[in-house]
Amino acid sequence: MERIVKPYRVHGGARVPHRKNTAHAETRAMPAPARVLLPMQQHVGAPCEPLVKKGDRVLVGQKIAGSGAAVSAPIHASVSGTVAGVEKVLLPGGRVSDAVVIDSDGSMEPDPSLRPPKAETLEEFLAAVRESGLVGLGGAGFPAHVKLRVPAGKAVDTLILNGAECEPYITSDHREALEHPQDVVEGARLVQGMLGIPRVILAVEDNKPDAIAALRAAAGDAPGFAVLPLRSRYPQGAEKVLVKACTNRKIPLGKLPADAGCIVMNITSAGFLARYFRTGMPLVQRRITVDGSAIQNPANVLVPVGTRIRDVVAFLGGYRGEPRKLLMGGPMMGLALPDDGAPVLKQNNGILAFGGADAKLPEPSACIRCGRCVAGCPMNLEPLLLEQLAEQRDAAGLARSGVAACMECGTCAYRCPAHRPLMQAIRLGKNLVKQAGGKN
Amino acid sequence: MEKWIVSSSPHLREGRSTQGIMRDVLIALLPAAAAAGILFGPRALLLIALCVASCVAAEWVCRRVMKRENTISDLSAAVTGMLLAFNLPVGLHPLMAVFGCVVAIVVVKQMFGGIGQNFVNPALTARIVLMTSFPSPMSSWVQPFAYLDGSDAVTAASPLGILKESAGAGLPGYLDLFLGARPGCLGETCALALLLGGVYLVARRVIHPAVPLTYLAVAAALSALAGRDVLTELMTGGLLLGAIFMATDYTTTPVTLKGRVIFAAGCGVLTMLIRLFGSLPEGVSFSIILMNLLVPYLEKWTRPRPFGAQKEGRGRAG
């Protein structure tokens, strides 16, 4: 195995508290919930159309929704039972999507027709990945088969497995590395072989020495493999930051990692691929970290996709005190939910609940131009300037100042001593630019 | 059913606040305040207290009159008061000091929108207003420890004044300069105390060390070129006070580190030009104020390029 000693320099970022309280406890498997809600939009791209109707009996792993669009990923039943209907659900972020609702029969009977897929050619492999329903499990939800299809004319020489997990609290990738290091390496070798990529870098923040050791042991002397300990500094796991830290290459603005010769994949996604090609069972369950000051017993839980958050919390002994804020994802980039009846989605790696002071943010005061947002921005933007321009509704100025490059990591707002709502203003600014662009 | 708070990410904050930063600056100024008390007597401490109280009171009244939310708790007015006091001779009439505080807070800071909005340093601008309004009291220096034998009225020439007038005969030695035993503004003389404060600010990550170091390095290099004694040059006048506490002021300097370093270098050049060729003995205040005025241009020239942006696609007009 190749050894890379040090990551390359990256700009900005912030020291965030780790709070990885759940890193050292075995993942708990959740029994079948009474009901699951499977939204038709659990990925970046076109929503799926339901393939089942009310009253149909479905089995675990059976495809219940799909789409003919190139960028999409099918959805599979995560419990066995009866389709109760199609309902509207509110997705995190405010969009409304249709969701297939399945009442579980409690038996978790798998679909007997599932077989390990054949993948002798690249096309067969990519078709099988599409049918697995896999999307980026680290949070972005980009369909894996699209990511793995290298555009013609682009040469990819590096596969980066993202195990940085730089968000506080979240440990679901950490547990994958500890519990299934062989699967992670096997999945990576599969992709490496199919796409003909010489180099594989497993990148993990150095606050997880046990995960680094487990992956090193599992990788053994696999050709082209290297495990790279990253600096524990948020946001190491952001794609552009990660590619720079691993290869010293910059992804050009508005381009994909393939434009820098890289494919970036979450380590749990790689572990899933290995299991899928062994068993044929598509993406119907996932590990999520459930933590936060308002959770009775924080833990990693293996849950059927579509399980309602309140059922997961109840399985762990319920809330502690009065919960006031519920997050899907980590505290830096996660979305606040208006309702704990929302389902766990494929790309969702954590559920955090906070009560009391943890649920509230300090009041903003005037900007003192300290420059911490500028020094912290991994994209080298000037968040204080973007905030001003957004307040002035200056779409042209925002576009000139590169607002579109912002990846919404939240480092600026995290560091701001005046507690300015920088991230919110920048999101508004991005929308202003989009609207102005639509008019021209 | 609970009521969930829905807000924009991030849902976590570092824990720093404007008040915390200002408190750190006040702590960093304490050694120099103590030194002023020892060197120039209780009157120095009274003057500091008067300036802090006047600045805070001026800010409070101003915000009341403007019907704006009160901001005295962010401690920035207290910092301005302390810095202004450090720039005054110990024997200055208290009413003149109060006048300076009103200029700093009302005219320079609040009339332009309060904290974060003033385009020049309030304490330094007030010092310049006082110097032009009351030139004689503002340059009546008292010998250190003169208060011990009750000879408050004895005036003496400052080291830079000596350099200007008599080419260096009768200058204090390095140790006296380092400990602050020389005539001068009450907070600027003790190099040791100012350096302690600077180390504290760097350790607390309130300021970046590159800023004061660039200022001092440029001034040192130019004074060496001019054949002056470098250490004397660095430890006299308001150079250390300015480099550590004024050229690092967030509001009146560029927001990028690159911009701040260029700002500091400009301060170094201007300070030495004034010291070498100007008719005034000291140039720190003027050089920082002049550089303050250039900040919009420095910002424009040092605007960072987004990560991954192509050279030609820079896309940033000022």
Image (cartoon, grey):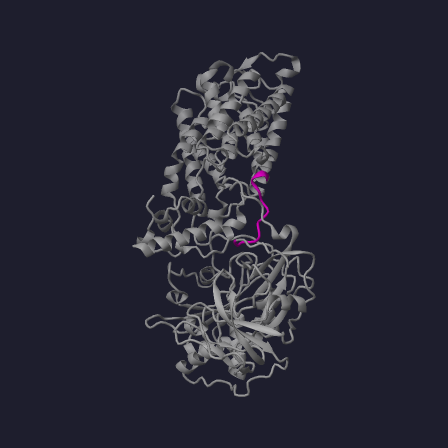
For the residue pair A362 and A202, the one nearer the viewer reads as A362
Give the dominant element type of the magenta stretch: helix, strand or loop: loop
Image coords of residue A244 (percent x, y):
44, 60
Residue B313 appears left or right of B276: left
Residue A380 appears left or right of A331: left
Above/below status of A107 relative to B266 = below
Quarter in which the C terminus of chain B is drawn: top left
**Image quarter of residue A439:** bottom left
Q: Residue at x 55, y 20 (%)?
A: B98
Determine if residue B106 is in view. Answer: yes
Which residues make up the magenta segment?
Answer: B8-19
Determine if residue A221 is in view. Answer: no
Image coords of residue A357 (percent x, y):
64, 50
Image coords of residue B299 (percent x, y):
39, 41
Above/below status of B133 relative to B113 = above
Q: Residue at x 36, y 54 (%)?
A: A435
For the residue pair B61 and A149, the one nearer the viewer reads as B61
Q: Is residue B17 magenta?
A: yes
Image coords of residue A40 (percent x, y):
48, 71
Q: Residue at x 42, y 83 (%)?
A: A124
For the residue pair B273 and A80, the one nearer the viewer reads as A80
Quarter in which the N terminus of chain B is drawn: bottom right
Q: Is residue A99 magenta?
A: no
